[in-house]
Amino acid sequence: MITSANDKKLYRHITLENGLSALLISQPDATKSAASLAVNVGHFNDPSDREGLAHLLEHMMFLGTDKYPDPSEYQRYIKQHGGEHNAWTGSEFTNFYFAIDSDYFINALDRFSDFFIAPKLCGEMIAKERAAVNSEFQLKYQDDSRRLSAVLKETVNAAHPYSQFSVGNNETLAGSGEDLEQVLRDFYHTQYCASKMKLVLLCNQELDTIEKSCRQYFSQITNRQLTCDFDDVPLYLNEQYSVQINVVPTKDTKKLTLSFELDIDDINYYCKPLSYLAFLIGHEGEGSLLSSLKKAGLANNLSAGTGLSGYNFREFAIHIALTELGARSTDRIIGLVFQMLRMIETQGIDAWRYTEKHNIMNVAFDFQEPPKAVDLVSHLSINMFKYEEQDIVYGDYAMDSFEPEAIHRLVASMNPDTVRLVMVCPQLATTKTAKWYDTPYDILPISSQRRKLWTLTSIDNELALPQPNPFVVERLAFTPPQTIQDKPSILLDEAGFRLWHLPQSEFTVPKGHIYTAIDSPIVDNTPQKQVLCRLYIEMLHDSLAQVTFPAEIAGMHYDIYPHASGVTMHVSGYTPKLFLFFEILITKIRERDFTPQRFEEIKYQLAKSWRDQRKAKPINRLFKGLSATLQPHQFDHPLLIEELANITLDDLQQFVSALFKHVHLESFVLGDWPTREVKLFGASLHRQIDAIAEAAPSIPRQVHSLANCGTLVRQFEQTQDQSAVIVYYQSQDNNPSQVALWSLASQILSPLFFSEIRTNQQLGYVCGASYMPINRYPGMMLYVQSSVANTNEILNAIDNVLSEFAEYVEDIDETRWQRYLNGMKSQIDTKDSSARQQATRFWTGICNRDLSFSHRNKTLEALASITPQALISFIEQRLISPSPDRLIMMTGDELEKSAINYRTINNVNEFKAQTPVMLLTPE
């Protein structure tokens, strides 16, 4: 099996006697073990009269087996031992996966494997889970991606399984629990079997031991000799080519997509011709298609790559985010796209370009950062269906076979006679409505005159293919540090500037991370300054795209994002050229050469994005509202939109000048650079900033206090047929003891809350109880979004679960209590799996003023001393007292005054002006 030299894991591929194919992975230092089983069954397999059946079956597989009949047992066991679990149903595959503390992996496998041996598929639970599927359908009824998918399904060959409704709802899954139980059992027995399954197991044991467990628990899965065969019908009929599909979205989105169905015989994963074409078409550097469209004021973004794909079809799609002018000039844009395609066909299929992409992929494979164990096993279980055995790990990166003739045939087939255009725009006229999501749409043939017009579009002389990329590194090697440190140290500490450094020793990859937070007193807690800061960042991303794209392609990445009192930059990638990349960025961010055209467009797009938040899921609006209520530097979108409307380009330029007049820089560098190089980098950065700015003190993070407020209620307009409630409790202290207590309470409550609200009462598909700190002050958030209950009913259900919480803790015996403590310890003390995770953890510590990096260890010490009685006292005093301090965020109906005593927040700005703040002080 092909693996990278940097991958220290051991792999073994086996096939059990029942036909199940398994990949075993031994990682001796793994603290989390994981498993994933993918089965070659998806919504393409749904009976035509039971659309969504595969999805419903996925839900049901979790809810008890013959050996473990309790529907909540599996979830509870995983949660108690620091784990996570989930599943998804796609068109042709269903994937089940989990991760857990390694010591409990074998017992978890016993429970997991029984899903596929003897699931209960109980009629009583089927009725409840059908309600959950329907709730999921309703949750995304307004989701524009789902609405667009519904249109695409109606504009393909109705005989192709892609045309089927994939999610399911009460209508497609109608019937009694007993009837559905029989339907599900029949479907399970005719679709699920060992020969259609691929399994991946990763743990810290030796391969022989893993294989023994694999055979013990998964050999009992029945092999019914089933195969997955679909009718080889075409995805499109002849009249469904060369058409324009007009779609009206719910949000103010303007997007044009050109898609081309391709000959799948010309596509193999060793060549990756579609990756090569996407590389050229999606380029954002000088002379690129996107650069030309931006200069003409026609588009804001462009992406290219694989579109719809399945067992007998594959599309290449070009997605273009349009400006207002672009939405009125689609033929001009399409003409430019075809110019680029013909340029690639005649000039762009070169060995050196392919070699450059090959080198980028090879370096990425050799020095990839390992993902979370659960993400890795889930991904590889699907790869087992896609690649040969030796390429299960390597297949995504393989680009070893330059086949110019195949690439040429593919690009030549992308022509006006085969294109399918999808135009998404609110102003389009339509005559049809897609079933299930009620999406207005139309499908119209493209005339020969229009197709000819595209070929006559005036030549854009600035359009050009990419030049050789100066940032590509062909050979890399890790440089071990001279001294090993387990936490960052301060290299430079000057007025207005502090540089932290950690030489990389744990992960032997030649990659680095550079974080720099720029605090400026100009970014105060007024909505105008926050809007200016956000607009500045959006303008930066737009202006930097052409400059930074070659570096991004070569494996270097950046992000610039706002924090409470300024701007943070994060740069990551291969260390040989990362300092150079950072220098380019730090120079560019001080420039103010924004054009009026791009200013107006970015301002419009930002306002549109904020306006669209009104159409976001109700619970997401409440999440944002929670932050805007409790954080001094955050504001509601309507206020931000109001401020944005009055801002001019001159205002923005003045803000940028003021931003860099007084600054405090906090930087952190992690990588395999020698310390002397990091010092030189830091000194250079300090000189650049010191030449233009005066030193300012670091600005402390703040959060508004809910102490002695009782129950506060903030109500939001209900914009969808869904009710949503968040109940938030806040700690008044951020010491490690409080962090441990609030974290443990949330961890124990979470499965209980989910089981009662989602599984038993079926109040909502989206619900949860989670630990929610704000600026390191601990908190707990309980949330529900429901299509079947109003806000009063939801709040009553939440309070009822909380009232039972103390009794639940009282019934926990010593063994289970230790399990909870160990599970919480595992979550807090999770080992970094990559340099990225390590960098993020230490940078979070710096931002949270954990300057000794001891907060985690202190929290673990505090956790060990918590007793059940202490937790019960906490619940009684903080969560279920007669008048608890808490904040309720809600949509829809007003609360019944007779039920609880509360005060309403009618003006959030007045509330914040009258409410004291808590500061985040250094530890």
Image: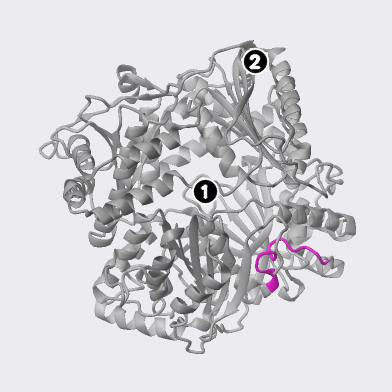
Residue placed furthest toward the front = 483
Q: Is residue 120 left or right of residue 678?
A: left
Q: Quadrant of the C terminus?
A: top left
Q: Position of residue 449 (x, y in %)?
A: 75, 61
What amino acid type is highlighted by mark number 1?
Pro
Q: Earlier in the sequence, mark 1 or mark 2?
A: 1
Q: Position of residue 480 (x, y in %)?
A: 72, 41
Residues 550 and 681: in front is: 681
Q: Position of residue 573 (x, y in %)?
A: 70, 42
Read off the magenta span: 390-401
Tell me, yes or no, if residue 435 can be seen here: yes
> Helix, strand, or loop for circle 1?
loop
Q: Is residue 265 left or right of residue 727?
A: right
Residues 574 and 157: in front is: 574
Image quadrant where residue 55 sits:
bottom left
For disc 2, the marked residue is: 657
The residue located at (52%, 19%) in the rendering is 523
Image quadrant where residue 276 sits:
bottom right
